[in-house]
Amino acid sequence: MKNYRALPFMLIAAAALAGCSTLPASDSPLAQARNAYNSAQGDPQVTTLAAAELKQARDSLDRANNASTKGESGAVVDHLAYVTKQQVAVARETAAQKAAELAVANASAERDRVRLDARTREADSARRSAEFAQRQSEASQRGAEASQRQSEESQRSAEASQRQSVMERQAANDAQLSAQAARRQTLDAESRSQQLEAQLKEMEAKKTDRGMVITLGDVLFDTNQSQLKSGGMRNVQKLADFFKQYPQRNVMIEGFTDSVGSNSRNQELSDQRANSVRVALLGMGIGPDRITARGFGESYPVAGNDTAAGRQLNRRVEIIVSDNSGNIAPR
Amino acid sequence: MNVLSRHQWYLAAAIGCAAVVIGGCASVAPPTEQMAVSKSAIANAVSAGGSEYAPVEMRTAQEKMDRAQRAMAKEDYENARSLAEEAQADARLAEKKAESAKAQKAAIVLQDDIRVLREEINRNGK
């Protein structure tokens, strides 16, 4: 549109100027300008980063082409071609500048990242060396303490060896006495353990890996109740007498049920039955610290749950007698 | 809009025709504005570092500007405008070359910084 509007003026101007010019148009600089423009046009860096500059060059090239087709003087065409060529170069330089500026922006971001990395690592290594130093100082402190202990020990051992020689003389005397006592004690212990076994046998205790186990059967409880029946109470009384006689022995009470009914009900019932035995023993004067009670629900069956007899065997309370030092192996 | 601008255009064309007819071949209006524009373009190029980064373009621009001024003095306005226009194009190229070179230098310096920093980190890390 613009070109069409310019047409009348340009035609007149061209005619007027052509009248003055003497030389025919030479294509050479114009050809160079066209080549330069076309190659810049094909460079995506230039078209994206220097579009405005390239458009200016395009306008100049159009003017040069027009001047050439209108047969204007070679000097005019050459001049316009020259300006075009320089403007194409400006577009190229602009694109290169913008690309470099983008690279600078990216590199700045990267440098910041690298610096951050460096700081993080410095902080890490500082922390590590602090930890190392602390460990070292702790180690040297431990070393100092150890050497102090050693010197104390050697002093003590010197004293001890002195005492030992005194004691050894006494020991020789004592040994004779204790040999006699030991003989007496062995006899005592033998008679006592015989008594114990007899008592436990009376309560139908069985020897197991965990110690002597007395089983209170289901018949000693009311059905689905945790209350001990009078028969059960008699058995518990025997147990209480036994534990009073052997105060170094503790007792573990474990309740069990069959698999009939819900798990939670069975757990509850087994807890309650074990606990009622515990309560009975407490009532008979056994210290609470010696008695532990726990329900296991339908776990650890001693018989199949598929027969009535098996289920009856599974409904039980087991009383485990500890060893002489009060220990019971856990289930 | 179209009607108005067409009218305006006809007016301008008529004035242009009259100028060409009256002025004839010999006389063109002195390109004072172009001369000022080119001078300022050269000044910009100099302050951008054109003499350092684009000495060839810078020298050409200045030479053409000198010639344009001489043409102005001889009232050879046609030649003066053409020389001034070329001087402007040369000066702009010099300015852009300087800016582009500086930006590329900055990019290289920065990349070098990063490389040095990385090396330092790797040394410290060991």
Image (cartoon, coloured by chain):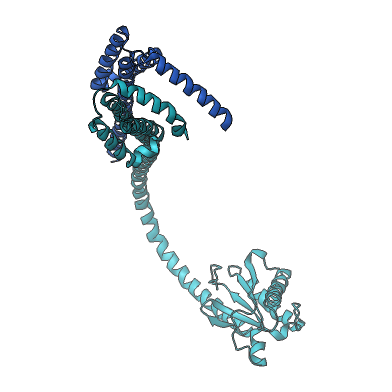
Chain colours: A cyan, B blue
Q: Can residue A193 be seen by looking at this rendering?
A: yes
- In depth, the one of B108 and A12 nearer the eye is A12
Say if B119 sits above or below B78 in the image.
below
Residue found farthest to the top: B73
Estimate the x, y position of residue B121 in percent, counting from the top left.
31, 37
Estimate the x, y position of residue B47 in percent, counting from the top left.
34, 16
Estimate the x, y position of residue A45 in percent, counting from the top left.
35, 39
| Residue drawn at (64%, 64%) of the image | A289
Say if B63 sits above or below A315 in the image.
above
Q: Can residue A130 be seen by looking at this rendering?
A: no
- In depth, the one of A114 and A291 nearer the eye is A114
Q: Would you identify the image quadrant in which residue A214 lies?
A: bottom right
Image quadrant occupied by the C terminus of chain A: bottom right
Q: Would you identify the image quadrant in which residue B71 lies?
A: top left
- In depth, the one of A209 and B89 nearer the eye is B89
Estimate the x, y position of residue A300 in percent, counting from the top left.
58, 80
Say if A262 sits above or below A327 in the image.
below
Q: Would you identify the image quadrant in which residue A42 lies?
A: top left
| Residue drawn at (47%, 35%) of the image | A1
- Tally of numbered tags: 0
- In depth, the one of A42 and A24 nearer the eye is A24
